[in-house]
Image (cartoon, coloured by chain):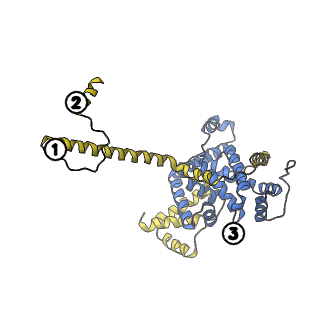
Amino acid sequence: MTGEPNLETPGSSASDAELIQLVTQRDEQAMTEVVRRFQARVLNLAYRYLGDRDEAEVVAQDTFIKIWNRAETFRGSAQVWTWIYRITVNICLTNRIRHRIKTEELDESVAAGPAQQPREAFQRREQQAIIQRALDMLPEDQRMAIVLSRYEGMSYEEIGTVLGRSVPAVATLIFRAKERLRMRLTPFLRRGKLSP
Amino acid sequence: MGTICNSVSLLLSKQADGELNDLETRRLTLHLGSCGACAGRQAEYQALNELLLAPEPILAPPYLWTRVRAAIIRRPEVKPGVWETLARRLRPAMIPLAAAAVVALAVITSSQLSRTIAVNSRDAAAKAVNIEPEESNVPVLIPDVPADTAQDSLDTH
């Protein structure tokens, strides 16, 4: 591989599937293009699940390394991005990297008080922390289903493809997750601490 | 909430995600027309969905590809062999398997020991009442030691 690739400018016009096929032949330019096209989605999926940027970067790295090493396992019948998402999800779930709210950092920023931060930003951070704590308490599969549904905007069918579950199973996963979240967050809603 | 409401809750969850089919939509609409509790639950799911907004996206750092490339070059072809793959797959099950093996061994050993003691006790009892012990197929794990020799052994310890 020569020089630093410029990942900002559009690269190959090959389709995603064609790129993966080239990667199986150890085409480094194709791999560069794969990273360029998917790094944002992979990174943000990991970030939205883990809530930690550093951990998300590690997962993203591992995802692309796995793509390089396992490109031949891509079956052309699926879409490339669902296959890549599946790899990312499996790395997140397998490593059991749990998001932990950095409470020390959060407490410090909250303790700083609204006087030292714009009130709106403070309230938003506090609200996000409460929601994240509730998400953190979900079982891994329910949490991932919620992240894919609400944060990634995926349909139940797409989530089923990524998680290897049927659509009804995904619907049940999400329903159970929402029930737990509802039970946990409703008191905050009633106290006015959270507002949609 | 009744049984019907419990089943409708799943529909409410799907409705909030836009995943209802036509039949489910009709069924839900019919039920909500007469159930205030489910109407309230519908509002809660909608509010929950509005709360669950994705965090601001983060930008991929410029060094991400550099690190991936370095890792790829460092280990160009990492394809595990059959045994490594098998070992990797079995690894999560090793501890419970090992524990089960230890427990099984303990049970078997204990069982053998109990039988041996029972046989010896039966023999002793039989001798006490001058009854010939039955033939036993249980292997004797503890070798017969003449009583006086055994006692001497105990005395020296």
Q: Counting residues from the N terminus, which is met first, the one under dot 2 or under dot 1?
A: 1
Q: Which residue occupies the foreground of this view, B145 or A32? A: B145
**Looking at the picture, how far across and down is residue A179, in whole percent?**
51, 57
Q: CA distance from mark 2 to mark 1?
A: 20 Å
User: Which hue belongs to chain B?
Assistant: yellow
Number of residues whose C-alpha sits closer than 10 Å to that of mark 2, classed few (under 14), some (14–19) or many (20 or more): few
Amino acid type at mark 3:
Ser
The residue indicated by pointer 3 is: A77
Residue A176, percent from left and from top: 51, 58
* Quarter of the rendering occupied by the N terminus of chain B: bottom left
The numbered disc on residue B126 is 1
Q: Residue A88, image x and y in percent?
A: 66, 54
Q: Amino acid at mark 1?
A: Ala
Judged from this view, the residue extending furthest toward the right is: A3
Would you name the residue on which mark 2 appears?
A: B148
* Disc 2 and disc 1 on one polypeptide chain: yes
Rate crowding at label 1 as few (under 14), some (14 to 19) or many (20 or more) other CA atoms within 10 Å.
Answer: some
Q: Check disc 1 and report its element: helix, strand or loop.
A: helix
Q: In the current view of this chain or complex, which residue is farthest to the left?
A: B129
* Chain name for mark 3: A
Q: Amino acid at mark 2?
A: Asp
Horizontally, is A64 left or right of A4 in the view? left
Q: Position of residue B106 (x, y in %)?
A: 38, 44
Q: Chain of mark 1?
A: B
Q: Which chain does the blue colour mark?
A: A
Residue B10, label in figure: none
